Image: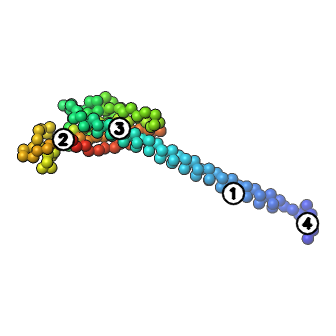
Amino acid sequence: MNLSKKNQSGVALVVVLMLLLIITLLGVASMRGTLLQERMAGASYARSVAFNAAETALRFGEARAKTKPVLPATGCNAGVCAQPDPAASPVWEANGFWGSAATTAVSLGSEYSGADAEYIVQFMGKTNACMTVDLRDAEEGAGCPGTERIYRIVARAVSPSGAEVVLQSTYKIQ
C-alpha cells in the first residue's frame, strides 16, 4: 500500500496527545495523594507531641497532688481547684480557662518542639478503708481508718500546629 502525505490525517498526533493527557492526569493524582499523606503524617506527629506534653503535665500534676496542696474556698488558683459542684460543668470547659491564672504551666524543654502544657489538681473528696466516699473535706470516717484523699488531675497540651490533647487521671493518697 502506497500512502502519500496527502492521505495522512494526523491520527498519530491525536493518539500521542491523548497519551500525554492520561500520563499528566496520573501524575497530578499521584501528587495529590502524596500531599495528603504528608499532611496526615504531620497531623499525627503534632498529636503525638501534644499527647506526650499532656502526659508530662499530668505527671507534674500528680506530683503536686502528692503534696496535699491547700485548696481554695472556691474556683481555681495556680493549678489547684476547690471541690467541684456535681451539678456544674467541669471548670476546664469554660472559655478562657486554659492559659489563665487558674492553671499551672509546665516547662517542657526543647524535646516537645514548642508545645504548651498546663494542668489543674482538683480535690474530689475522701475515701476510707470501708470504701465509702465522704464528699466533705472531713477527717477519717467513723470506724474505718486509713482515709485517702482523692484528686482529679486534668492536663492539657497544644502543639505549635494546633493539635490539642486533654488527659485526666485520678490520684489517691493517704
Compared with residue 36, is residue 50 higher up or lower down, i.e. above or below? above
Q: Amino acid at mark 2?
A: Gln
Task: Identify residue for label 2.
Answer: 174
Q: Amino acid at mark 1?
A: Ile
Task: Identify residue for label 4.
Answer: 3
N-terminal label among 4 and 2? 4
Q: Residues within 10 Å of mark 4 (few under 14, many from 20)?
A: few
Say which residue appears at 91% left-offset and 66% top-offset. Answer: 3
Cα separation, mark 3 vs mark 2, equals: 22 Å
Please identify the quadrant where the C terminus is shown: top left
Task: Identify residue for label 1.
Answer: 22
Nearest to viewer (mark 1 / mark 2): 2
Q: Amino acid at mark 4?
A: Leu
Going by the image, does 149 lie left or right of 52? Answer: left
Q: Residues within 10 Å of mark 1 (few under 14, many from 20)?
A: few
Cα separation, mark 1 vs mark 2, equals: 72 Å
Nearest to viewer (mark 3 / mark 1): 3
- Residue 156 sits in which quadrant? top left
N-terminal label among 1 and 2? 1
N-terminal label among 4 and 3? 4
Nearest to viewer (mark 4 / mark 3): 3
Res. 92 visible in picture: no
